Amino acid sequence: MSGTPTPAEMETAFSHFATRASGTEATSKDVTRWFTDSGVLSKKPHMTCNSHTLDVCFTVVKEKGGNTMSFMDIDKLIIQVAKTYKADNNLATDEEATTEMGDLAEAFKSFATKANNTEATTKDLSRWFTDTGAFTKKSCNSNNLDICFSKVKTKGKKCVQTHTWLGHKERFDAEGKGKGMSGREDIHANTGYVGNYKGAGTYDGK
């Protein structure tokens, strides 16, 4: 095992997966993806350290009434999850479990493999989408991803930057919820009195 990760190292890893408040707040889904990709959580049927356990522990440590946690809560979350991680991995103490979990979580900063984990190839994204169940047996598959990837990456580049995952940020509100059609198109209120009026407040006065 490597040495215990520093708080700064753990915070960097946390920020790669946190999707709220500019990477400073994480949902249960964010942490589940992080801990699953890093090997902390298991998908094996007989293991108890799984996504369900994470959801329960997340509820315990997050702020009451909220649906996210900050990096300041990560130690408390690891201590909670360590109880089942220790049993699954036949470790002697809770301290061994928390240390091993911290090492795994810090080491796996992101599925992105380029430019110090800030850029991802189509192979990186394909692995991520496959692991998270985003792909279906129909048209949402690796071939479709390759086509979409070629359209959004910068011309001449083979990667996309991780901070652009959500595309146009105006499509989401402050809480990360989609705005629907209003986030994709300019919707005019049609409050003008004359033909071809573009909307209230757009008239250039003399």
Image (cartoon, helix red, strand yellow):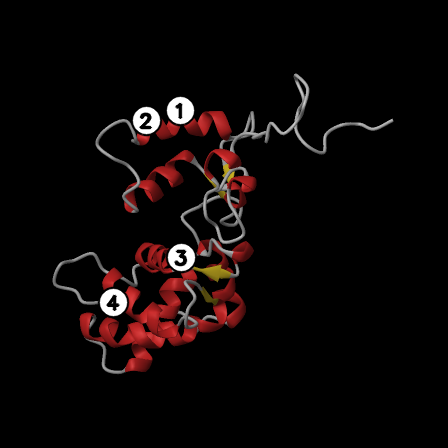
Q: Earlier in the sequence, mark 4 or mark 1?
A: 4
Identity of the residue drawn at 39% across and 39% down: 125
| Closer to the camera in the image, 121 or 179 | 179
Tell me the distance, in whole angstroms, between the alpha carbons under discs 4 and 3. Answer: 20 Å
Q: Secondary structure at mark 4?
A: helix
Whether the residues at callouts 4 and 1 have beta carbons within 8 Å, the answer is: no
Q: Earlier in the sequence, mark 3 or mark 1?
A: 3
Q: Earlier in the sequence, mark 4 or mark 3?
A: 4
Residue 195's place in the image compared with 192, above or below, is above
The x, y position of residue 75, in whole percent, is 42, 75
Tell me the distance, in whole angstroms, between the alpha carbons under discs 3 and 2. Answer: 26 Å
Q: Which mark is residue 143?
A: 2
Residue 1 visible within the image: no
- Quadrant location of residue 203? top right
Residue type at tag 2 = Asn
Residue type at tag 4 = Thr
Q: Earlier in the sequence, mark 4 or mark 2?
A: 4
Tell me the distance, in whole angstroms, between the alpha carbons under discs 4 and 1. Answer: 37 Å
Q: Which mark is residue 53?
A: 4
Question: The N terminus is located in which quarter?
Answer: bottom left
The x, y position of residue 154, in whole percent, is 56, 29
Identity of the residue drawn at 48% across and 54% down: 16
Tell me the distance, in whole angstroms, between the alpha carbons under discs 2 and 1. Answer: 7 Å
Whether the residues at callouts 2 and 1 have beta carbons within 8 Å, the answer is: yes
Tell me the distance, in whole angstroms, between the alpha carbons under discs 3 and 1. Answer: 27 Å
Q: Is residue 156 left or right of residue 66?
A: right
Q: On the image, numbered disc 1 is attached to which residue? A: 147
Q: On the image, numbered disc 3 is attached to which residue? A: 108
| Label 2 crowd (10 A; few <14 / some 14-19 / many >=20) | few
Image depth: mark 4 or mark 1 in front: 4
Residue type at tag 1 = Ile
